[in-house]
Each structure stands twice: as structure tokens, then as C-alpha cells.
Image: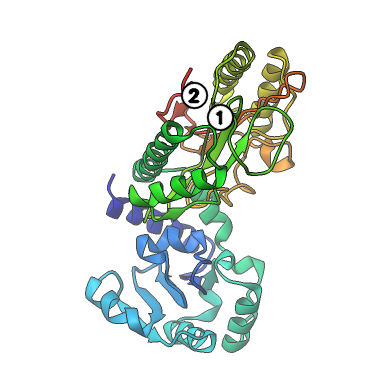
Amino acid sequence: MNYEESMKRRTEAILAEVERRGFDTVVFVNEVIGQNPSNFVYVAGRWGLGEEHCALVLNVDGGSTVVMPHWGAARMRESGLYDEVIAVRQEKGHHIRGVREALAASDLDKVCFDLSTMSAQFALQLGRAMGICLTPDRDISDHVFKLRSIKDEFEIAEMRRAIYITEEAVMELVQAARPGMHTWTLKKRLDAAMIEKGAYESSFDSTIRFGRGPPRPPGLVKHDDMLLVDVGCRVETGYCSDMGRTWPMTLDADVRDYLERAVAAHTESIKAIRSGITGNEVLERASEVNREYGFEPLVRCGHQIGLDVHDYTMPYAPSFGPIETDNQPLEAGMTLTFEPQHVDPKMNMRSHIEDIVLVTDGDPILLNELPWKLLW
């Protein structure tokens, strides 16, 4: 499946639900740069990242209108992606007037919205301007979140691409790290390497921490340290990576024993992930395995990931946590991080091993390729 086929699948699935709920038009909004609500990016595609004051209006009969700032309108018209392009100034009032213009020929009783893509203030002002109330029954976001939780082949390939970029940068970090270097220096190198290798941006603020001895703030790396990295990037289609690895500066007997147990526990607990099992059950099994290997029980051990690094599909799809929504069964096609912490209070050691797993009806598929055992 390629990009165009994936976008067509998403649009058709959304419009089918719009019609099923008794509407004929749906509106998605992107207010400001940096907000980039992921449901907007899901339906707009790669152009939706980095834009602002945009709206996408889709009709079940196939009609489409995009509202966007004047400086990008000519380019959008040339693309031929949408039937109509309405140019507005980069200001909220003009944005709202553009949405009203896009809906001028619509029966407003038949219009629904993805309310997750707009602020409460924007929704209030838009409703007042159109003389309607944007109530929960007009909100289609729950369906979009559910669609996002199941990835198609293109989406999985994009996540693999983000993972590959991140793993290449992490491997360079591992090879470069030496006692006497500052963790801030290593972090800067790591973040820059991902951009150099093709990332659109970091998917969150990366961290490099110490895994041996009492927790301490960023600082100079010592000969007996273990380093823990937590890092991810986003590619230009919006899809994210999030991974963690642990490696020692010096491999003494205690460190080897700890790391071997951590990898063994990780290997055993990941086997629980498959369709039909709830997120809570995966957490319970991972905690059970941790205790068997001498580690502390877990509070959580992973989350949904896709267009957000902590994907807001979570209310409608489970993560590996202890809350009520995690008591839902996993479904084939879901992608989640798996990151059970392995804390040994007696040895005062902790690690961070994190990968993205694809849920199937059988064994989980690990999307990462970088080994868990680094330098030992």
C-alpha cells in the first residue's frame, strides 16, 4: 500500500461513518503552527504538518474544500488535491470566516466536526459565527481515533522508517560515548544526528540518564556508569518512533549479571502481547516476570504510538497500563511501545529497553532491529 492508497482508505472510512451517523459533511481544523492535531494530519496527510489556520471540509458525495493561509493557497490549487481552495489571512477571525464560506451551501444540521482538532475557544467562536452549538453528538473524533489505532501497511512502513533513523543515531551515540563526556553533549549529538539522517523533528525531548547508583542529574559520564537513552523522531508524514537502550561504560560482573537478567525478563514478558489479550493483562504478566528475575513490579510498560508518540488513541484502544481503558483487548494492527522498567533495588541498577511492537493474532512483531545487547 502506498501513500495515496492509505489516504484514500482513511478518507473513505471516515466518510462512511459520517454518513452512518446521519451527517453529510465533516470539518477538520488546524489552528496554529506546532499544534498540528493528529486527527487533522491523519486526514490531510503530509501537507498538514507545519501549517496553521487551515480547515478541511469533506462531503460524503466526494466534494472537498480546504481553507488555508493565502501564501499557500496557490500551491494547494496547483496540487489538485481538493475541489476548492479558500485563501484566508493568518488570523483567527479570517480562519472562522473561511470555514463559514466553505460551509455556505451546506445544511448545517448535517455537518459534524472533529472537535479534537480545535481548541474550546475556537469551537465556541465558530459555533457562534454559524449559529449552531458544537455539541458532542456532532463530534466524529472518537471514530477517527479508533481508525488511527489500527495501522495499514503504509503507516507501519513509515514507523519503520522513523525507527531506522532513530536506531542509526543511537548506534552512533553508543559508539561515541566515553567517560568524561557530558550527557548534554551526547544528547545534542543524538538530536542533531536524527535530523541529519532525515527526521522531520524529534517526536519528544530525548533523555540520556544514568542507570547505576543513586539517580543523579545530567553530568559527566564516569567509567562505572550505565547509560540509558530514551529517544524518538517524527518523519514528514507525521509518524513517530520511540525507543530506549541501555549500555555500560565498563562491563564488570555485577553489571553483566544485571543486564543479562534484564534482557531475559524483557524477552519473556514481550511474549504476552497478542490480539485478544488486554493491556492490563500484558502489564500483569510483565510485573510477574519482573518479580521472577528480582526486579520491582511495574506501574506501566508501554503506550499506543503512531502520529503521536503517546497516541491519543488511548481512550479508545488499550495501552499497557493499570487504568480502566487499558482493560480493552488488543487488536491485530495496533502498534505500541513495550518498555518494562527493570529496577533492581538491591544492586541499585535500572535500565531502559523500549521498542515498538506490532500486535498480531500470533506472536508480536518487533519493528525495531537494534539489538538489546549493546557492547556486551
Give yes or no for contact between labels 2 and 1 (Cβ–Cβ under 8 Å).
yes
Question: Residue 139 location, x and y as percent?
Answer: 59, 65
Specify the label residue 372 is tagged with.
Answer: 2
x then y, percent, for residue 314: 61, 47
In percent of width and height, residue 350 lies at 66, 27
Between disc 2 and disc 1, whose residue precedes?
1
- Classify mark 1: residues with Cα within 10 Å, few (<14), some (14-19) or many (20+): many
Q: Residue furthest right?
A: 346
Q: Residue at x 47, y 78 (%)?
A: 53
* 344 or 118: nearer the viewer: 344
The quadrant of the rendering that contains the N terminus is: top left
- Badge 2 element: loop
Residue ID at (45%, 32%): 174
Label placed on residue 167: none
**In the image, what residue type sits under mark 1?**
Ile
Q: Which residue is mark 1?
A: 353
Q: Is residue 190 left or right of residue 291?
A: left
Q: Amino acid at mark 2?
A: Trp
Q: How many marks?
A: 2
Q: Is residue 345 left or right of residue 258?
A: right
